[in-house]
Amino acid sequence: MSGTRPQQATLSRDTDLSKTEATRTVIENMVDGLNDHRISDIGEFFAENFRWMGNYGCGTKQNLRDFQENWQKPFQAAFRDKVCIDEARLYMGEWAAAFGRQEAVHHGEFMGIPATGKKVEIRYMDFWQVKDGKIIDNWVMVDFAYVLAQLGTDIFNGKGWEQFDNGTATPPYPSPKMKDS
């Protein structure tokens, strides 16, 4: 890359490392609360005005009520017997991150697909910022494409890059740069 490089890690640069254990406690208790399927009292862990920023298909929630009404309730309506399993967690000051999976049974409509009764795996990554004992921001990536595939819908119509991995298609390669003349 030539020229000025973009600044990196601007949000976490000045984190207070002395807050690491307090952040760990908030996140561990919050995950237990989600596994207990709590909705109405989840504000114990989230600030009223926290932001939940999901990838396309998940939406963005601007506060606790939006999170409860537009994420938790529809999610629990679509999936029962849901268990969240963080496979790894990292803590640094007021920041935490995790990736893992939820295991659940598809028992209500999800993305237009009626209940199938199938057990599914829902992969995710979470990044949280904690201030004053509450989560104030949550960046989320949920692999809805994989969930839909488990329910029989390939949103990539066979054109996902898995075709390169399994040898059914040849990946394209970039053209060599032309020299300036």
Image: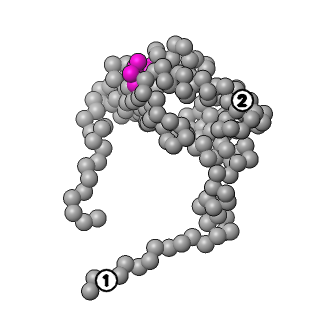
Q: Are there few (<14), some (14-19), or many (20+) residues within 10 Å of tag 1?
A: few
Q: Would residue 116 be counted in the magenta stretch?
A: no
Looking at the rendered structure, the kind of residue marked 1 is Lys
> For residue 128, what is the image quadrant?
top left
The answer to whether any part of residue 25 appears in the image is no
Write down the region rendered in magenta: 45-50
> For residue 169, what is the image quadrant?
bottom right
Q: Residue at x 46, y 73 (%)?
A: 174
Residue 81, position as x, y percentages in the image: 70, 26
Q: Residue furthest right?
A: 117
Q: Are there few (<14), some (14-19), or many (20+) residues within 10 Å of tag 2?
A: some
Where does label 1 land, which residue?
179
Where does label 2 land, which residue?
108
Taking 19 as reference, is 112 left or right? right
Residue 179, position as x, y percentages in the image: 31, 83
Looking at the rendered structure, the kind of residue marked 2 is Gly
Mark 1 → mark 2, Cα distance in angstroms: 57 Å
Q: Residue furthest left?
A: 4
